[in-house]
Structure formats: C-alpha cells, structure tokens
Image (tube, grey):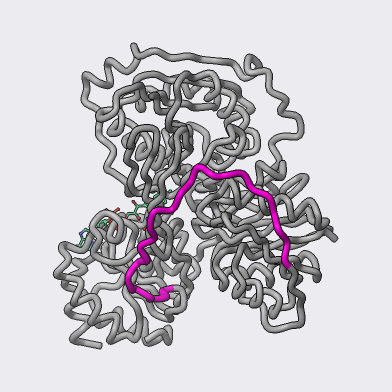
Amino acid sequence: MNIVVAMKQIPDLQQIRIRQRQPVLDGVPAALGIIDKNALEAAVLLKEEEGGQVIVLSAGNEEVEETVKEALAAGADQAFLVLDDSIENADGSLKAPILAEAIKKIDDVGLILFGEGSGDNYSGQLGSRVAELLGLPQVGYASRIQIQDSQAIITRSLEDGDELVKVTMPVVVSVLGDINEPRIPSVTQILKAGRKPKEVLELDELELDLSGLPQIKTLSNLAPETNRKQVKVGSVEELIQALKTEGVI
Amino acid sequence: MAGVIVYSANPELALELITVARLINDKVVALSINDDQLAQALSQAGAQAIKITHPDLVVADTAAVAAAIKQVLDGVQADVVLLSSDRRGKELAGRLAQVMGAGCLTDVAALEVKEGQIECQRNALGGATIAVQCIEGPQLIAIRPRSYPAAGTAAGSLEEMAVEIKASGVKVLEFKAKVGDKVDIEAAETLVAVGQGLSDEGQLAGVQDLAAKLGGEVACSKPVATDKKWLSEERIIGLSGKKCKPQLALLLGISGQVQFTVGIRDAKVIVAVNTDENAAINYMADYIMQADLHQVVQELKQKL
Ligand SMILES: Cc1cc2nc3c(=O)[nH]c(=O)nc-3n(C[C@H](O)[C@H](O)[C@H](O)COP(=O)(O)OP(=O)(O)OC[C@H]3O[C@@H](n4cnc5c(N)ncnc54)[C@H](O)[C@@H]3O)c2cc1C
C-alpha cells in the first residue's frame, strides 16, 4: 500500500513584510506548509510499520521542483508534481481536480493525507474536495491514525470531543498540526533528496476541463491598520498607572 | 436575491447562521439531520426548517451528509449555502462545495452584500492580511463561530424530508466528550495570556492568581496548549484558536507570530511583556515591558 501526501508550496510567512498595508511577496522564498509536514511525518511513521512508498504530491509553479526536496529529505520516497503558473495562487476549486487526476495515476494508494489547513490560507477544503472527486470516504482533523488490514482506525479531534472512527481504505485524511513532531532531516538525507525519483507533469498533460475555475475572486488583501501606541514602560508601577489612565483596570 | 440554505450540527452556530443568512435573503431555509431538537430551534428562530431523515445518516460521515444536503438543494431553489466554520463544518465545506460545483470560502469573519454580490472577509497569509473575496457561481461560505449573534425568536415552519444515501465507509466506534474547560475567552473583558516564555507549568498558578485579581481569564498561545498541554485548547488565541476583543490583553512571553496576533489585534489595550527587546509582539502593543514575565507577574500581584 502506498501513501500519498499532498503538500502545498507557500511563501515563507516569516519573511513577508508589510508596506503601506500591502504584503510584499517579491523575493520571499518558497516553503512547504507547516501542517503539511505533520501529514508527511504521519505518512512516514505509518510506512515504517506497514511498508509501501510515501509519495509527495504537489501542484504549483516550477519552483515546486526545488521546494519539494525538503519533503524528499524528510522521508518521502518519491515526488509527483504537476506544474503550471496558473496553479500557484488558485483556490481549491481548481487545485482539487488536478490533485485528484494525479492521484488516479498513482498505483495502490491506501491513504491520502493532507494537513488540516495550508500554512497561508488555512482554508482546509482541498482534502474534502479531492475525496469527493475520487468518491472516497474522508476523516478530518485526525490526531491518531492506525492501520488494521484494509481498515484505518482514526481519532477525529473535534472541539467538544474525540470521535474514534473505523473506515475502509482508501481514505482521505487531514491531520492536525499536533499529531506529531516532524523529523528534521540529516545532512545526508538532504543530499540524497535530489536523487529520489520525481515524476513531473505539465498541467495540460492531464487533459482536464478546468473552464470556469477558479471560482474565487480576491477584491483586496491588505494588512489591518494598526496604530498601537508602542510606549515602553520601565516598571510595574508605571504600567499600572498607564492602565489606570486607560481605564482598563 | 439568492436563495440561502444554512446548516450546522451545532445548534448555537446554526442560529448564528440564520442571522448571517438574513443579510442575504429574508427567507432562510435551515437544515437539521435526524435532529428533532435542532429542527425545532431552527423553526422557532423563524427559518423554514427542514429535518433531513435517514436512519443510517450520521454527521461523522461527511460524504453522506454532503450527498443528503445536495438532495435538498435540488428541491429548494438556493445557490448560497452557509455552514459553520467549526471543524465539522469546515470538513463538510469542501466536500459539499465539490458536490455543488461551488466556490468555497471558510473561516469567514464578516460578510457584506454589495450590489448583489456577497463580499467575504477572511484572514490570508497566515493572518498577516485580511482578504476580501467573492465567489463566482454557486457559493458555499463557512462562517467563523461567534462572529454574529444568534437569531432571535420568530415564526417559522418545520417539515421533514427523507433522503437516499449510499452505505458509507465510515463507522463511529466511540465518542469521548472532552471533559470540562468551559471557559469562554472570547467573552472576557480582560485576558492574561501566556506563551512559551513561561518557564514551567508550576508558574501557571501565579498567572491564574493575577488573572483572577484583574477579573479576567487566562489564555495562551497555541504551543502552550497543544505541545505543552499546560492549558486547554479552549484557551488558545489566534488563527486556529479564538478571536478575542478584550478591553485589556496582557501578553506574557509571547513572540507575536501572526497566527497568534490575528486573534488579539482587536483588543482595546495590549500590553506585551517579553525579555526580547525586538520581539514582534512589541509592534502590536500599546505598552511594552522588556522584562522577565515571572518577575512582572509577582510584582503585579503585589501592587495591584
Ligand atoms: C496554520 C497555523 C495556525 C496557527 N495557529 C496559531 C494560533 O491560533 N495561536 C497561536 O498562538 N499560534 C498559532 N500558530 C503557531 C504560531 O506560528 C507560533 O508558533 C506560536 O504562536 C508561538 O507561540 P509563543 O509566542 O508562545 O512561543 P515562541 O515563539 O517560542 O515565543 C516565546 C517568547 O517568549 C519570550 N520569553 C522567553 N522567556 C521569557 C521570560 N522569562 N519572560 C518574558 N518573555 C520571555 C521570548 O523572547 C519569545 O518572544 C499557528 C501556526 C500555523 C502554521
């Protein structure tokens, strides 16, 4: 059984600056979504027990070829990439059919893992869309995954409790950011990553009808106005005085 | 104006959705799945409530729920579906959107109808920005919990609708309810929030005393709850936690990553206590104290 892990290339959020309320993305390096790395770690841990291959799947612009090396270093065996500039900033309605079509080309897939949300938009819809397109069951917000024969036993962590479910594979699962602690690859693993097999497709090779997609239009995207006082206070007395003047204590 | 259907398995959130739906259309269809009590509550809030019935349909089976809702959509003329953006709602959102051929926005904090177009506000770039977005074609919008008040009482109606579903691959073995932290940090006027600057769990007692003294609640950054497990997840401020608007937010040992600050930027007064003079949180604060938080907590407790 093989495990597919869908990972999204995003701008490194730590390095985005705001200028006149506009995010400045020029020169910001690409990174993989942070919760996607938890999904990868979950896949690698399961593979270590169950065997099979971990295939990282990513769709985006041509930079993805470089970005995905991080996942190959951290335990993925192969990469399956679909490249096109139009994918990079598109919403889930466009990405879902692309990922679903790619997954159909991968043999013997038992689990398809996503992070609970991407690092940048945290929208959390792509896994559900892909499950629908593939006609597969899904379990979101997983905090534990075990495999028993052809079934997965998964704990879905909700706001008010933990739901233990049993589901027939193949299944699409999205994992929580605290399901595990992703490993840090060693230098040798990083060096070897470039040599792991990669299948790279151009978007038009998938022969999908993507007319009318994506469906989301962004009217504006600005940092909220902040006009905080930023007053430095030297002592607790000074702080108490200031808060009294503000009328908040 | 567009027909609107709302659904949430959580009764409180379902009533909030009715409020939002009325911004789009006075006539609101609200769904319940095999849940009499919810269906009653929806009709008493003035909605045209439809109880979807099928003996084997459980909310844990996202595929079946999406298929069931689609059958109602086909009968009622509606091109906008509102869901709650709690975990159940978000998981359903993508699936139902795909079934409907709809564009989908989740975690929407505010919505406005302008010239017939629904404009949604949601955080983007990890919370660094607020995007205003709209959907072309059928629309699925998941609304962040507690962004709108619950609908009040009004006369509605209630009917039942049987649906067909396929046998599912998802079976619930057990449900363990989370025990007890019923704190509502979003309602608190004063929050004392701790981050990873807190040296150990034992130091929490002092922080709790301070919060009590200020008449507020203790809150935290995400790692304090999810990695260290010193406080419950109910107390997390931020993108994957709560969005709070207290009068006073006292932030202790929190670095100020945007996924955190997005949950506190609407506070009236923000105080940051951090040993690092250049901590990002300082740019978000009204009062900045470069100091050891444990020291500050002790002194505040004595001097307040
Ligand atoms: C998709 C996604 C969603 C997320 N959602 C959330 C969310 O909802 N909420 C959230 O909080 N995080 C969230 N995060 C995580 C977030 O990015 C940060 O990792 C987290 O907020 C950091 O927590 P922290 O500030 O407590 O810890 P750190 O970043 O480790 O900061 C600790 C701070 O304490 C200071 N310090 C150390 N010792 C002392 C001392 N003795 N006295 C005073 N100060 C001291 C340090 O200088 C430092 O600034 C999310 C991340 C992702 C990717």
Instruction: Give the residue at x 34% y 22%.
Output: A52
Q: Nearer the viewer, residue A46 or A165?
A: A165
Q: Is residue B19 magenta?
A: no
Task: Please tell me in which quarter of the rendered image ligand 1 is found.
Answer: bottom left
Q: Nearer the viewer, residue B267 or B117?
A: B117
Instruction: Give the residue at x 27% y 42%.
Output: A181
**Residue B212 found in image quarter:** bottom left
Q: Nearer the viewer, residue A27 or B230?
A: B230
How far from the left and from the top, in percent, is residue B103?
Answer: 69, 45
Q: Is residue B16 above or below residue A14?
A: below
Q: Is residue A217 visible?
A: no
Is residue B139 toward the left or the right of residue B297 in the image? right
Q: Is residue A53 visible?
A: yes
Give, as a single range, the part of the protein colored magenta.
Answer: B160-185
How far from the left and from the top, in percent, is residue B258?
Answer: 43, 53
Report the residue that reaches farthest toward the front: B55
Q: Is residue B170 above or below residue B4?
A: above
Q: Nearer the viewer, residue B174 or B200?
A: B174
Is residue B280 toward the left or the right of residue B81 in the image? left
Instruction: Give the residue at x 50% y 42%.
Output: B169
How far from the left and from the top, in percent, is residue B283?
Answer: 40, 60
Quadrant where the C terminus of chain B sits is: bottom left
Instruction: Give the residue at x 29% y 72%.
Output: A233
